[in-house]
Amino acid sequence: MTSPESLFAVPDAEEVRIRIPRYDRPGPRYTSYPTAPVFSEKFGDEDFRRALSLCRDRVLSIYIHIPFCERLCGFCACNRRITQDHSVARPYLDALQRQADRVAETIGGDRRTTQLSVGGGTPTFLSPEELDRMCKIIDARFPPEPDAERSIEVDPRVTARDQLEVLRANGFNRISMGVQDFSPVVQKAVRRNQTEEQTERLTREAREVGFLSVNYDLIYGLPFQTVDTFRETVERVIENRPDRIALYSYAHVTWISKQQRGFENKDLPEPERKVAIFLTAVEGFEKAGYRFLGLDHFSLPDDELAIAAETGDLRRNFMGYTTKEGVDLMAFGASGISETAEAYAQSTRDAMEWQERIVGGTLATMRGWWLSEDDKRRKWLIHRLMCQGEVSPSKYETKFGEALSDRIPDLEERLAPFVDDYLLAFQDGAYRVMPIGRVFLRVVAMTFDAYLPGQTGDRPMFSRTV
Ligand code: SF4
C-alpha cells in the first residue's frame, strides 16, 4: 500500500475530481469471491461436511453471530432479531454449543483458534454470565493460540463495565463500537440516539480494563448529513483517538431493509454530497495521523493493521481486514458464512429456524459454493489488489504457471481508464493502487469478477461504492 498523502496530488487534479463520481456505482465489498449472491442453495449439509473434512489448516478463525437487539436502528441492514426478551439467549447458546460439537467432530484434531470475532446484532445483549458461557463453548473445543486476536462488536447504549471485564478475562483484546454519527439531527432521523458521553465512557472503560485496540464504526450518507455536520463528528471522533475506524457507506436498500422506508429520499445526501462527505472524512483522519488502509478502513500508525499494510501482510475475510493469514474460517450462529480453501457455506439466516435445524441434528446450511480453479485464481487476484494494493502479472504467473493475459485477455484495456484517472499506475511491471484508487478498490476489483455480467436485475444487488 502507498503511504498517506493527499488523495488528489495528481497533475490534473480538478479534472480528476470531476470524473471521480463516475466510480460511485453498486459493487461488492469482496469479503469473499465469489460473492454471496453467487452461492447456490443446492450446496447443503453434505457439501459443508465434505468441505470441513478437507480443511488442512491446524489453526482456525472463528466468527460467532449473536443476532439479538433490543431496538431497531432505522439504517440497519444486518441480520438481527429485535426483542426485549432476554430469555432468548439461553436456547441460542444451547444451539451454539451443539453446532460447535458438530463442527469439532467433523474437522477433528486439535484445532486452535488464531482469531475470534463476535458480531451481530448486539453481542452485549448477552449478560456477563452468558458472554462467559459463549467464550467457554468455543475455547473448550477450539482453544485460543497465545497471541490470538479476539474482538467483539458492542453497542455503547447497552454495554456495561461488567460485560467488558468478563470479555477481557476471556482474552478479548479488541473492541468495536457502533458510533455512526454524533449529530443529534441525524441520530433522531435514524432512530438511534446515542450520546457522546456514552461513546466516550465505553471507550475509556474499554481501555481501563485492558483492551488493546478500540474501533469505531461510522456511517456516511445518512439522512440530513452534510459535509459540515460530519466534519464535526470526525473532530469528536479524533478527540477520543480510537485505534481503528471503519467508515461505512450507508446502503439504502429499502427492498431488503423495510425499516429504511422511514427515510425520504430527499433527506439523503445526493451522490456528489456523499462523495464530498467521505473525502472530507478521509482528509480529516489523515491530517490527524490516521493511515487510510483502503476502501473504508483507517488506523493509527502503530496499530497492527497499519503495520501489516506497511509490510504487505494485510489479509481480508468476512470480518474485513485482518492480519491473520490463510486460516479456515468457521462461522457459528444464524447467517454465519464459513470459508475454507475449497468452499463457502452459509447458515440459515432466521435465528429461530437456525436453532431448530441445529437442534434437529443438522449443520443448518442454507447455501454455499465450491470454488472452481478459475474462482481460486480470481480470488487471489482480488485479494492481492485489496490487501497489497497491486496486481502483478509476473507474480500471478509464478504462482499459477499461466500468463495473466491467458486468464483475462483484455485486462490491459479494462484497467486503462483507472490508469488514466490515477486510480492505478503501472510501475515496475505491476499495476499499483494510487491514493485515490484506495477509495475505489471495489470498482477496480470488479474487473476480475467473472460473475458480475450475469448479475443483472431491476434492483442492484450491492451497495454503492461511495
Ligand atoms: S444495533 Fe446494529 S444490528 Fe442492531 S438494529 Fe442497530 S444497526 Fe442493526
Image (spheres, rainbow, N blue to C red):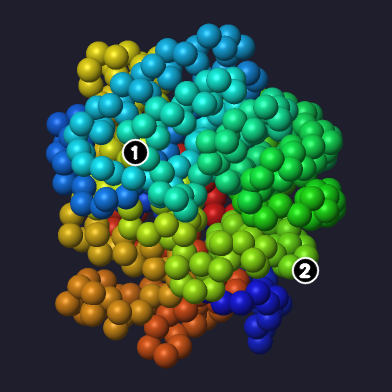
Q: Indicate left or right for 437 with 299 as reference.
A: left
Q: Indicate left or right for 232 with 51 as reference.
A: right
- Answer yes or no: do the residues labelled 1 and 2 have beta carbons within 8 Å? no
Q: Position of residue 310 (x, y in %)?
A: 54, 73
Q: Is residue 24 visible?
A: no
Quarter of the rendering occupied by the C terminus: bottom right
Position of 175 relative to 450 (above/below): above
Amino acid type, label 1: Phe
Cα distance between the residues tagged 1 and 2: 42 Å
Amino acid type, label 2: Lys
Identify the mark at residue 96; answer none if there is no mark. Answer: none
Q: Position of residue 322 (x, y in %)?
A: 48, 56
Which callout, 1 or 2, points at the residue further toward the start of the chain?
1
Q: Residue at x 57, y 12 (%)?
A: 86
Residue sitting nearer the eye, 345 or 214: 214
Identify the mark at residue 142; answer none if there is no mark. Answer: 1
Q: Residue at x 34, y 67 (%)?
A: 381
Q: Residue at x 32, y 50 (%)?
A: 59
Q: Indicate left or right for 113 with 254 as reference.
A: left
Residue sitting nearer the eye, 74 or 63: 63
Q: Residue at x 25, y 33 (%)?
A: 104
Q: Give the class, few, some or many, for how many residues have Cα within 10 Å of label 1's Cα (few <14, many ≥20).
A: many
Q: Give the class, few, some or many, for how many residues have Cα within 10 Å of label 2's Cα (few <14, many ≥20).
A: few
Secondary structure type for disc 1: loop
Q: Indicate left or right for 332 with 124 as reference.
A: left
Image quadrant in which you'd find residue 394? bottom left
Position of 49 relative to 221 (above/below): above
Q: Is residue 150 visible?
A: yes
Residue for badge 2: 287
